[in-house]
Image (tube, rainbow, N blue to C red):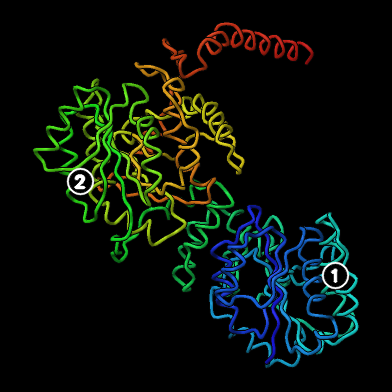
């Protein structure tokens, strides 16, 4: 059987997602020829990767005009309309779906045996007042009788480069089926939705609004938009896909993290580091940056570092020459090699790390830690926080670095939330909102290509205390800011400083550089009922006797509290009183 695949690709970041490579790998054996048509501007590296893996025979890069139908037309022109007749089967599809969830060969062999079916797709839309019944265009396969028909040639040769997507839907997607039916051909769909009960649905588009039905009817592809549009049930969809198919759901997590924000709730459950085989780190250059402000904690960390089963270079920073001398004395006693730098008492642990740019940039993986204390509440805050971070990021470092090496998409690994922040509501939406402007400012200064507005976020996924393992390239824009002492406020550090902003920015910087992140799980088990209790506390109905204006907008917030609030209350009272008088 001589089959042709015309595969249309589009990515707003001009990249080829991992799910596309997987998709083509699964589809490739079925086809005599694969034409990869991209409406994006792909790098030479991506093109060469597609060719090296033999995932395409022809490559067409075009402007994103006319959408998929104009791209498929260009693919047919590339082959030559006269040469299309030499193929037994032609499939047009795009990369807007995940899959195949099951062996796609079985679907082809089944339909190719059915003489009564001239063309087929995955799902269809029933007739409405706006359009007639039709196959949805993300996947359609035509058999030879259709390919050789005048109706088929006339339809495709007359495709125009429309810039209005609705016009493409109206004149092409909804008409390709009608055109061929009018020419006497018959079609079928893997999931014929026209007879399904859709009374409970917003719209009878099952591929978009009812992904559960897609899986139940064993449709081999599931739309990307179905995952995005149904986020409230997506965790269960992912679990179901994992249960009923061999499709690697990490491809879904990776792509959705790339094209959306990486910290959506439905994604976070799949961000934990998974158990995997050990890897050889012999040829990897690994650095550990350790900021030592409290020298009395140095030996605790040196003991923890002995858990490493890999070679690493240790870079220690501290704030004074006296502490440097103490540190070097302890290092000698512990026979631990390290380079020690005095960076001053400014910028906490973050600025000292950034000042080591010329050293750290030479390494494949970098770990960043510091001697965490909390003088006001050390045992239940500082000590518990520090010990849990050590348990999450230092002791399991072998496992973490193995994950970084195995998965090129992972740019950094952060710690799970320390228990102190699950028992106590310290990080809340009010305060996070006050940090957002500084985060936006830094984002702009880094010149990152992806657009984000942190003012729209209620909270942020971060490694509390800035403990982190990372690939240098994932955080390179932060290092390239070349921040100095003048960019950071002096101690005592005020609330919502640039350092607090950087702590919250790490996973988003990596996202902007096309990396994902993973979380090292806290070994301390806490029931989620704790979170439920904490987050659902109802405030008192009585007036507050104290308002913290640091969390309410500072001076402006206080002004609004004194003047604007009462003025609005009086306006409301007058308005309601007038309404009652009129009635």
Residue 420 in percent (x, y) is at: 29, 34
- The residue at 29%/46% (across/down) is 393
- The residue at 53%/47% (across/down) is 513
Could one spot residue 120 in this view of the protein? no
Foreground residue among 560 and 570:
560
Q: Which of labels 1 and 2 is toward the front? A: 2
Residue 156 picture quarter: bottom right
* Disc with the residue nearer the chain's start (1 vs 2): 1
| Mark 1 residue element | helix
Q: Position of 117 compared to 406: left or right?
A: right
Residue 496 in percent (x, y) is at: 45, 23
- The residue at 38%/32% (across/down) is 355
Q: What's the distance in space between the residues labelled 1 and 2, CA to CA? A: 66 Å
Q: Position of 195 compared to 43: left or right?
A: right
Foreground residue among 50 and 524:
50
Residue 180 picture quarter: bottom right
Q: Which residue is mark 2?
A: 305
Residue 88 in percent (x, y) is at: 74, 89
Q: Residues within 10 Å of mark 2 (few under 14, many from 20)?
A: some
Q: Which residue is mark 1?
A: 175
Residue 224 — which label?
none
Could one spot residue 388 in this view of the protein? yes
């Amino acid at each position: 059987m001589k089959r042709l695949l015309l595969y249309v690709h589009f990515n707003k970041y001009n990249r080829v997602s991992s799910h596309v490579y997987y998709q083509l790998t699964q589809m490739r054996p079925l086809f005599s020829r694969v034409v990869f048509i991209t409406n994006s501007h792909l790098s030479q590296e991506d093109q060469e990767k597609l060719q090296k893996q033999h995932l395409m025979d022809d490559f067409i890069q075009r402007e994103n005009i006319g959408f998929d139908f104009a791209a498929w037309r260009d693919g047919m022109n590339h082959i030559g309309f006269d040469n299309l007749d030499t193929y037994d089967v032609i499939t047009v599809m795009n990369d807007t779906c995940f899959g195949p969830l099951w062996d796609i060969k079985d679907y082809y062999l089944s339909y190719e045996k059915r003489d009564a079916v001239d063309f087929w797709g995955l799902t269809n839309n029933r007739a409405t007042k706006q359009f007639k019944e039709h196959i949805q265009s993300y996947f359609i396969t035509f058999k030879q009788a259709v390919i050789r028909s005048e109706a088929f040639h006339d339809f495709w040769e007359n495709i125009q480069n429309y810039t209005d997507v609705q016009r493409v839907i109206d004149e092409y997607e909804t008409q390709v089926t009608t055109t061929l039916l009018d020419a006497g051909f018959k079609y079928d769909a893997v999931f014929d939705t026209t007879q399904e009960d859709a009374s409970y649905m917003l719209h009878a588009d099952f591929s978009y609004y009812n992904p559960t039905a897609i899986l139940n009817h064993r449709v081999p592809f599931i739309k990307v938009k179905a995952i995005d549009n149904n986020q409230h049930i997506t965790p269960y969809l992912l679990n179901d896909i994992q249960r009923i198919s061999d499709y690697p759901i990490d491809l879904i997590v990776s792509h959705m993290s790339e094209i959306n924000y990486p910290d959506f709730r439905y994604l976070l459950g799949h961000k934990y580091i998974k158990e995997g085989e050990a890897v050889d780190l012999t040829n990897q250059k690994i650095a550990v940056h350790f900021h030592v402000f409290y020298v009395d904690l140095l030996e605790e960390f040196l003991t923890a570092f002995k858990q490493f089963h890999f070679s690493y270079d240790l870079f220690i920073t501290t704030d004074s020459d006296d502490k440097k001398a103490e540190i070097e004395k302890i290092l000698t006693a512990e026979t631990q090699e390290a380079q020690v730098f005095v960076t001053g008492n400014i910028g906490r642990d973050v600025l000292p790390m950034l000042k080591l740019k010329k050293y750290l940039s030479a390494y494949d993986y970098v770990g960043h830690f510091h001697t965490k204390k909390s003088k006001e509440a050390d045992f239940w805050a500082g000590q518990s926080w520090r010990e849990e971070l050590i348990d999450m990021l230092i002791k399991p470092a072998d496992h973490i670095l193995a994950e970084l090496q195995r998965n090129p998409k992972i740019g950094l690994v952060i710690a799970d939330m320390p228990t102190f922040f699950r028992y106590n509501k310290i990080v809340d939406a009010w305060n996070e909102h006050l940090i957002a402007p500084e985060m936006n400012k830094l984002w702009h200064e880094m010149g990152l290509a992806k657009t984000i507005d942190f003012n729209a976020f209620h909270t942020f996924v971060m490694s509390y205390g800035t403990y982190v393992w990372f690939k240098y390239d994932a955080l390179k824009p932060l290092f390239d800011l070349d921040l100095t002492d003048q960019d950071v406020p002096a101690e005592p550090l005020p609330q919502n400083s640039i350092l607090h902003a950087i702590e919250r920015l790490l996973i988003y910087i990596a996202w902007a550089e096309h990396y994902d992140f993973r979380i090292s799980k806290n070994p301390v088990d806490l029931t989620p009922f704790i979170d439920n209790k904490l987050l659902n506390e109802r405030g008192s109905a009585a007036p507050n006797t104290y308002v913290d204006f640091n969390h309410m907008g500072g001076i402006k917030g206080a002004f609004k509290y004194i003047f604007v609030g009462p003025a609005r209350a009086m306006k409301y009272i007058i308005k309601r009183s007038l309404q009652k008088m009129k009635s």
